[in-house]
Image (cartoon, rainbow, N blue to C red):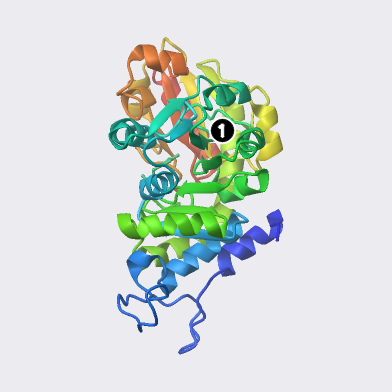
Amino acid sequence: MKLGKKNMHTVCIHQGQIEDKQFGGAISPIYLATSYPFLDVEEKRYPRYFNTPNQEVIANKVAALENAERALPFSSGMAAISTSLFAFLQSGDHVVFQNEIYGGTHHLIQEEFSRYGIEYSFTKGLELSDFENEIRENTKVIYLETPSNPLLSITDIEGVAVLAKNRSIVTMIDNTFASPINQTPLDLGIDLSIHSATKYLSGHSDISAGVVAGTKEYVDRIMYKGRNFGGNLSDFMCFLLERSIKTLALRVEKHNTNAQFVAESLDFNPLIKKVFYPGLPSHKNHDIAKRQMHGYGGMLSFDLDEALDAKLFQQKLSMIKPSMSLAGVESTIIQPSLTSHALLSSQERKEQGISNNLLRLSVGLENKEDILSDIEQALKKCI
Ligand SMILES: *Cc1c(COP(=O)(O)O)cnc(C)c1O
């Protein structure tokens, strides 16, 4: 079943919920048992087996939102990412990563892959030819992330999926920034869609979780690896995440509207050199974004005029808080050159287009004029 925009709200609220047959309560009960009747080894319920009732609620909800056969909840986004990658890669294999990628994923690759004999390469850019150029005889996985962090660059999802399908390569996408409301990569031919559910799926800055969605065959394969690695999500967190996802479509629609408004307004501000937001026609990949996204999301970044001090600007903000995380109901901001991308040399940052005055804004759900006026008043104090 293809989800229309309309029934996303209904799926968010109802899909997968456990019926409380005992008392008729309106929400899923929390089942904390770690011991269930023994049937046979395959079917036994156990938290690390990813099959407790509350874990299945999340699995069913996310699978429906991603148009997937199956999904699995993990204890963090990195648990979902690492388990998925290790389920499909072994010594002697090669994997292609897009060059703009989440910092934690970058660390995983650089610190662990060589030790296990897994070869990898990063694309030089985000064009389809950049992906094609890195494919080798032994390439088993292509991994993308769009919109990317922090420049909100867009990769042509369908194009990469076709490249990979022709060569029987498995494709994985980090779909965190878009959320399943704004982007359903499986519809575009991608095999596995992964989220840090710590971000939009949770949305209230109070849950650490991850999910992966795809075909039953591929997600089962990840589940069996996951039983060895042990990155399962606790039932309490499944309950909280279920509660959060009920408002996912509602929240993401508002994030989209607020971010579009802030991006358009900042684009006209003379104190801002450039705004990066896929919903702006001036964005270098706006056409691809328009084709493959249902909404442009709540993340944007902007370059302050060189004469302004980015640190002072952040200190002068009164409502918007400097914070590493993102996608909460509250607006937050970070300076990538000092945080997520601080470990890169300034030359490497320059090559990626990340200036020292770049700021990444996670546009929250406050009144959009309040978000904009906080930015404008802080800018004025920096002149
Ligand atoms: C936060 C984040 C992750 C990692 O998720 P955790 O829940 O922190 O492990 C991965 N990808 C993206 C795009 C993220 O923003």
Q: Secondary structure at mark 1?
A: helix
Quadrant of res 158: top right
Of residue 155 and residue 370, the one placed in the foreground of this image is 155
Image point (29%, 33%), residue name: 111
- In the image, 316: left or right of 99? left
- In the image, 139: left or right of 268? left
Of residue 337 and residue 250, the one placed in the foreground of this image is 337
Q: Where is residue 41 shown, x and y percent of the image?
A: 37, 74
- In the image, 91: left or right of 375? left
Residues packed near mark 1 inside 10 Å, few (<14), some (14 to 19) or many (20 plus): many
The residue where tag 1 is placed is 262
Q: Where is residue 88 shown, x and y percent of the image?
A: 45, 45
In the rendered view, tell whether residue 207 sits above or below residue 317. below
In the rendered view of the protein, which quadrant contains the N terminus?
A: bottom right
Image point (42%, 44%), residue name: 85
- In the image, 133: left or right of 382? right
Q: Where is residue 105 shown, x and y percent of the image?
A: 38, 36
Q: Where is residue 29 shown, x and y percent of the image?
A: 42, 77
In the rendered view, tell whether residue 118 sits above or below residue 228. above
In the rendered view of the protein, which quadrant contains the C terminus?
A: top left
The kind of residue on which mark 1 rests is Val
